[in-house]
Structure formats: C-alpha cells, structure tokens
C-alpha cells in the first residue's frame, strides 16, 4: 500500500507554513533526504523523509499552513509500507530483553504521531531515559541558569526541571516523562544546545507516548538532529526523549561522517543562507556536534577561526583577510582582569563587525527645533500614561519616521548583492535600540505606519519593559526594516551608528539642548535636537539622505504634518 509521510512535531500548539517543496511527483527519494522546508515563527526547519520510495503525490502546496500529523506526501514502492505490521509484532509482547535491544526503539510509522503501548505492557516499558534539550532556535547556544530538581527526586510529565537562558529569552524546560531523576548531567553555567543530554531518568514511562520524531534519534543521528530542529521551542518546547541503550545512534555516527564526506551532509536553512552571504564553501565545514548537520553556529565559528588564524580572506566577512593581531602582554605594565563578553555582547560584536565591513557607510547630521513638540508632549503625556503608555520622544519619532519612510521607500529596503537588486519592503517595522544590563537589544514596532501615536506609545512601553526585564519573545526582535538609536536621555551631541544589517539605514538621536536662534529681529532660545542618519551608499545617495532628514525635521517642527 502507499505510504503517507506526516509531519513530526513542530512544537506544542505550533502551526507551520510550507516554504518550499524540494521534490516533484515521480521523483525517487532516499531516507533522510530533505523533501520540504517548513517555517514557524522562530525557525525554518528542513523536513527529511524517513523512507525510500517514489513520490506518488504531494498533498500540500507552498504557503499552506500545516501542523504535527499533517500528511504532506505519499510514496509508492516504499520499504516503510510493511513497517506498521512489523512494529506491531515487535511490540505485541515485549520482554525486558527486547526492550533493551535496539529493535525496541525502531522508528514508529510516521502515520501515527504517537506509539501507544498496551496497558498490560506498561510496566515493561519503563526504563532509563535521557532527556535532551529541544531546539533553542537555529544556531542558538543556551546557558543553564537554574536546575529545579535534584537527583533522586520524582518528576511528573510537563514539570519544569530547568531554566535555559539564550541571548533573547530565559526558557523554562518541561520534561515529557514521569520518572525519578537518576542523574543531572549539567551544572549551572554550562553552555548547552539542541540535543544536549541534561537529565537521566529511571523508571520513566516516556516511551509510551514519545513523539514519533523522537524515535529516529535512536535509529539515526541525522534524523534526530532534523526532528529536533523542527521544534522551535523556547515558548513550549517539544522535548526529545531517547532510550539509554542508544547503540544504533553511536553506530550511525560513522555513517553520518561518511555521508558528510560524500557531500550529503544536511545544512540548516539559516546556515545555508549565512554561508551564501559570507561566500563560505560549506564543504569546508565540519559540523561540531557530529550529526552531519551544519548549523548556523558552525558557519560563524568557521569564519571566526579563519579570521583569528589568518587562514585566508573570505568575502564572507569583508575585512576578514585582516587577521587579528596578537595583543601585547599588558601584565608587564600592571594587574589586569579579563571579563568575558556576554552572549549578547558576542552576538553584537560579530554583527557589528560584519555590518561595518559589508555596508559602505555614510552619515549626515541635522538639528530639529522641537520646542513646540516638547510643549505638546508635556501637554498630552498624562493622557497617554492613563492609557498605559509613555509619550516619549522615541515614540513620537517612530510615528514620524513611519510617515517619512512611506514617502521615501528607498530607506525601507535591503540590498541583495548576489542579484544586484534592491528589495523594497511593503511593510514598515521600526526597530528601537534598548540598553539592557545584558547588552544592546533591538525590539521591533511592527507596521508602525498603520498605528496611531497612542498605540505606538503603549506598545513601545511594553516592548521596552519586557526587553529590560529579559522577558521578551523571539518575535519581538524580528522583522525590522529601519532602526532608531536614541541616547538623548544620557547625553551626547552626535553619534554615527552602524547600520543594522540587512537594513539600509539607521537614525541616531542625541541630547536636545537650548540654543539661541535668530528669528529675524532678535535671538530667542529654542530646544534643538541633533539627528544623524547613517545609510548604505549602494542604495541611497547623499542627497536623498539630506532630503530624508529635512522631511523628518519638518514633521518634528510642525507635528501635524506627520499625522496626515
């Protein structure tokens, strides 16, 4: 009979979208071949098929919404056709010996999201299980912030056992099995990523309801990596539980290495995209986790190593031909202290170096007379506060900038150097730089041109609070098309900011101050606010940048101009 390939878990309650279909009806496919790309709000996940055969029908199309268990493809001539009967036979009357053997962990038929163990076999299904971290986001490394259980403690399914921090969120990690904590395999402060084994349970019954995608973790390391990456997690991670006797997974590691050597290694979509941007040859990269799947972090680590060792230039990071010079020994002059960068500090450093080298920057400055605007702000700030927002200059700037970007759309773009095309975005999402104890973060006001000033003020207040309190959601940080950096509350008279790649422009605001201005008959004090725009000179000319600032200046000096 025909074999239907159904989607594994994308995360609890998560809906995905079909972004790409890599095969056509009539194509022969091999087990673990990538057949589809499914996008969620956090990751674009490659979907490997777990059977060989010929594509008889594709049951979805690009743009379709899909969930766990959706039948997306039908194969004919598949060796998996006989799998259901074989597996029923294998599990009909399991013995302790059979459960400990690899055959007990054979891949369940994808047609069923879960493998039900009969009630009379429940006792024999208990054994030791390793709890592995689900995906924290593509290429994301986390840190163990807190461990909520102790060795010997009984735990229940969905109990929070650990807090994992990333550069964007602190995620609670629920376990998906009942059992007793046999061993805690990490400690506070450890760096962890997708697939890290963090707990071992004894007496666990997880195999009774383990998600179908988890089983290939025992049968094939590459399949486990992809199944796990399909779960976008931190919000409600779909965990992976693997039986301790995972000898087949170990045995498959050489096969994964062989596949890599043959050029069949799997590559995450984000890693592929970044490698293309950085002109990195993916065949030169060896996956760090040994699964044969190249991650986003593998690409960045490869480029960083090239730079640090002076191992040749890559257009990946323009300027990477310049190897880091060795620092002098500062201790000969006195005592020193080394302070590691935070995760956000490391990410910011990498992104800033790349953006500064990849984008030909230029800047121009102007001052806006915000005397009248400040009077209006003082007049209406209590009304906005009563509505739950804060009528700040940044909120007003966001509204004004949305009006200018609508009029001058070349500032709301990205440049594609591969195709020599400028991508004009039909949406206006303004990123606001927020100073936090963890470092600089840029939450995004989505569709700012479609929102009123009060709505923007409320949303900006909520976003900024969540970001400073380390409670922001990943989607808060995504999709920006233009950025604002306002350090006016601290001081400064001018700031040349680095464009937030892949955007093409950023505006910096520094402290407003009273200055004497000639009104035609006398000098009068006016509150003047410095503004500097930085832009990508491949897309934007200096004259356009000057006009942009004039448009913004006009709105700030005559506020009603920006609201109509």
Image (cartoon, grey):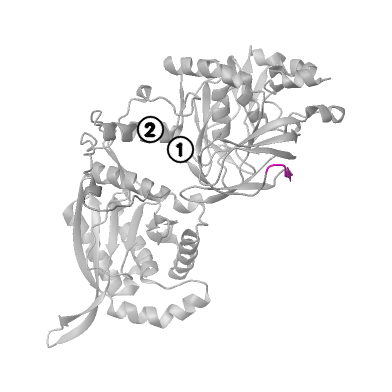
Q: Where is residue 176? Give x, y as percent.
A: 69, 40
Regarding residue 502, the answer to whether it shows in the image is no
- Residue identifier under label 1: 139
Residue drawn where x is 19% and y is 52% of the image: 362
Q: Which residues are magenta?
A: 151-155
Q: Main secondary structure of the magenta part?
A: loop
User: In the displayed image of the protein, which residue is found farthest to the left?
Assistant: 521
- Vertical placement of residue 59 versus 97, above or below: below
* Numbered tag placed on residue 299 in the rendering: 2
Residue drawn where x is 45% and y is 18% of the image: 260
Q: Mark 2 to mark 1: distance in Å?
A: 9 Å
* Numbered tag placed on residue 458 in the rendering: none
Regarding residue 166, the answer to whether it shows in the image is yes
Q: Label 1: how many residues lie within 10 Å, few (<14), some (14-19) or many (20+)?
A: many
The foreground one among 377 and 243 is 243
Q: Secondary structure at mark 1?
A: loop
The reply to whether discs 2 and 1 touch (Cβ–Cβ < 8 Å) is yes
Choose top left, top right, bottom left or bottom right for residue 275: top left
Q: Where is residue 559? Give x, y as percent.
A: 33, 73
Residue drawn where x is 44% and y is 49% of the image: 478
Along the horizontal axis of the image, is 479 left or right of 227?
left
Specify which label sits upstream in the sequence, 2 or 1. Answer: 1
- Vertical placement of residue 503 versus 226, above or below: below
The foreground one among 190 and 537 is 190
Q: Secondary structure at mark 2?
A: helix
Say which quadrant the N terminus sits in. top right
Q: How many marks?
A: 2
Along the horizontal axis of the image, is 465 left or right of 402?
right
Choose top left, top right, bottom left or bottom right for residue 97: top right
Q: Label 2: how many residues lie within 10 Å, few (<14), some (14-19) or many (20+)?
A: many
């Amino acid at each position: 009979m025909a074999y239907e390939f159904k989607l594994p878990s994308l995360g609890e309650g998560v809906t995905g979208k079909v972004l790409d279909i890599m095969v056509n009806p009539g194509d022969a496919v091999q087990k673990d071949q990538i057949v589809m790309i499914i996008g969620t709000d956090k990751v674009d996940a490659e979907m490997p098929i777990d059977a060989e055969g010929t594509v008889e029908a594709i049951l979805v199309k690009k743009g379709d919404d899909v969930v766990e268990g959706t039948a997306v493809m039908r194969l004919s001539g598949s060796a998996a056709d006989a799998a259901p009967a074989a597996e029923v036979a294998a599990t009909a009357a399991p013995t302790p010996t059979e459960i400990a053997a690899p055959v007990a962990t054979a891949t369940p038929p994808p047609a069923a999201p879960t493998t039900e163990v009969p009630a009379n076999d429940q006792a024999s299904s208990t054994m030791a299980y390793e709890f592995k971290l689900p995906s924290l986001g593509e290429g994301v490394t986390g840190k163990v912030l807190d461990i909520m259980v102790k060795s010997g403690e009984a735990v229940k399914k969905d109990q929070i056992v650990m807090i994992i921090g990333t550069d964007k969120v602190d995620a609670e990690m629920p376990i998906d099995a009942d059992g007793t904590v046999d061993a805690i395999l990490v400690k506070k402060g450890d760096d962890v990523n997708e697939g890290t084994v963090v707990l071992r349970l004894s007496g666990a019954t997880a195999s009774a309801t383990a998600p179908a995608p988890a089983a290939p973790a025992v049968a094939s390391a590459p399949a486990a990596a992809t199944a796990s990456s399909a779960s976008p997690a931190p919000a409600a991670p779909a965990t992976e539980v693997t039986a301790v006797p995972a000898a087949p997974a170990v045995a498959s590691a050489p096969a994964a290495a062989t596949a890599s050597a043959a050029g069949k290694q799997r590559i995450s979509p984000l890693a592929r995209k970044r490698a293309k941007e950085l002109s990195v040859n993916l065949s030169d990269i060896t996956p760090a986790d040994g699964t044969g799947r190249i991650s986003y972090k593998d690409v960045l680590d490869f480029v960083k190593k090239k730079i640090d060792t002076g191992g040749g230039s890559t257009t990946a990071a323009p300027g990477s031909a310049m190897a880091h010079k060795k620092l002098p020994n500062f201790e000969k002059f006195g005592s020193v202290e080394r302070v590691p960068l935070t995760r956000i500090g490391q990410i910011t450093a990498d992104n800033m170096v790349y953006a500064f080298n990849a984008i030909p920057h230029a800047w121009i400055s102007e001052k806006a007379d915000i005397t009248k605007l400040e009077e209006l702000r003082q007049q209406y700030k209590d009304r906005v506060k009563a509505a739950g927002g804060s009528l700040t200059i940044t909120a007003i700037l966001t509204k004004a900038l949305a009006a200018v970007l609508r009029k001058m759309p070349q500032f709301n773009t990205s440049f594609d150097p591969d195709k020599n095309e400028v991508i004009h975005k039909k949406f206006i999402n303004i990123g606001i730089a927020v100073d936090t104890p963890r470092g600089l973060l840029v939450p995004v006001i989505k569709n700012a041109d479609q929102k009123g000033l009060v709505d923007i003020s409320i949303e900006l207040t909520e976003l900024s609070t969540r970001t400073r309190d380390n409670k922001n959601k990943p989607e808060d940080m995504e999709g920006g098309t233009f950025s604002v950096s306002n350090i006016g509350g601290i001081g400064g008279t001018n700031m040349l900011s680095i464009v937030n790649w892949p955007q093409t422009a950023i505006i910096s605001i520094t402290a407003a101050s009273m200055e004497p201005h000639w009104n035609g008959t006398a000098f009068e004090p006016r509150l003047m606010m410095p503004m500097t725009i930085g832009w990508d000179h491949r897309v934007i000319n200096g004259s356009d940048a000057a006009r942009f600032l004039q448009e913004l200046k006009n709105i700030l000096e005559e506020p009603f101009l920006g609201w109509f």
